[in-house]
Amino acid sequence: MSRFPAPVIRLLFSSFVFVMGRAVALPFMALYLHEHLGINQQTIGWVLGGSIFFSTLFSLYAGYLADRLSKNLLMKLAGVVVAVCTVSLTIAPNAWTALLALMCIESALTLRGISLKATLADLLPPEQRPKAFSLNYTLINVAFALGPVLGAWLFAIKVSGPLWLAAGFSLLASQVLGRPAAIVKAATSEIKSSPAGFMATMRVLRSDSRLILFTLGSVLTSFVFGRFVSGYLSQYLIVSQGTQATAQLLPFILITNAVTVVVLQYPVGKLMQQKYLFRWVSLGAMLYAAGLLGFMHASSAVSWVVATLVFTVGEVIVIPCEYMFIDMIAPADKRGSYYGAQSLAMFGAALNPVICGYLLVHFHSDVMFWVLISAALLGVLLYFAGTRSKPAEEHVSEASETEPVPAVCKPQTCLSVLAASKQFAGNRVKNLYPFY
């Protein structure tokens, strides 16, 4: 960490403090809504999923704002919004007001995350960015190793206790940022021209088939991983084992997840190379599937911990790869917008509690796990199609020599998926090893 400039260290420390607030309260959100408002699991799914769905739509504009305005100011503003809305959850009288508060919280989290990624990319050369993002990811998981323990203790004393502490951490994170003038100077030094208008930026994003395919692949992997503890596992455990047993088991799952990431992230990250990204994503998806099979058949705390360990190794692989795919294709003056577009992957996380809640209510729980496994495998196909798709500038060059095609068709995207499917069906995906 000492190798990074002071503004980067400040950013990473602020991120750690901010995520501590999330780690204290987020794992117990489903339990809090159930205890405080007395709503059922399907309604909880709609509340949690609806808030993420809204913030995912907002991510496109959040990325545009990160390209246009001071990222430092946006991160401070996000911290204040999260603090105020988290406190408002303690007095929410019904599911609708809780949904409104969570929509604001999730949107602020999205804005802060995009601003942080774009600022780190602006401050660091390409060869140092993966290390900074890996360190940030490690700090996030350290926070999630510590936060749930503190949150469980506060939840046992008072169900709203974790929310009050989370609000305090959010405000503290804004103060940690301070006034780093160097961040503003360094972050703007690389940008030679001001970004285009919002609609013009959206047209650029829409024309990049690689971005579309990578984002769709991320939607499916996000559906599997996004909020897997606070989302479908919490819902499944509440239904199968009850509220108290869930509250006791969740800290073990979260700690296993966080410690595994902290221990394995660096050695696995050293092995990754950009030219082997698809191979790593494939391995990660297979481990997701194996972990989900473990969850399906878990019958004791030990079996839950083992399944979480396998699932988390998949996380260690897939999450950094998703960033590296986007960083590989993002122009310098549209980094915020590209990260914002990639944040549409949270549609998967938004749909997860809604779909999983519905499946748990109307079908056997095994159906939910098989749907999640299918999503992980389909995501691999979309990543493969993205690696075979042409860069955006090549599409522009080809389009100038042919008749215009309506944008809604997106033939290059469809053809990429079809070509990938044919290669998979023909067993021509060879030499998946080594990974380094």
Image (cartoon, rainbow, N blue to C red):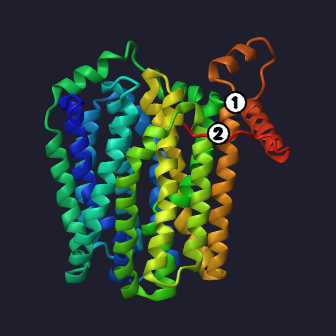
Nearer-the-camera pick, 358 or 2: 2
Q: Secondary structure at mark 1?
A: loop
**Quarter that holds the N terminus:** top left
Q: Amino acid at mark 2?
A: Leu
Q: Residues within 10 Å of mark 1 (few under 14, many from 20)?
A: many
Q: CA distance from mark 1 to mark 2?
A: 9 Å
Residue 400 percent location from the top left of the image: 73, 12
**Residue at the location (29% across, 24% down)?**
187
**Residue at the location (80% across, 37% down)?**
419
Any part of residue 222 in sight: yes
Residue position marked by numbered label 1 in the rendering: 389
Q: Are marks 1 and 2 in contact (CB under 8 Å)?
A: yes
Q: Secondary structure at mark 2?
A: helix
Q: Amino acid at mark 1?
A: Ser
Residue 293 percent location from the top left of the image: 61, 71
Residue position marked by numbered label 2 in the rendering: 213
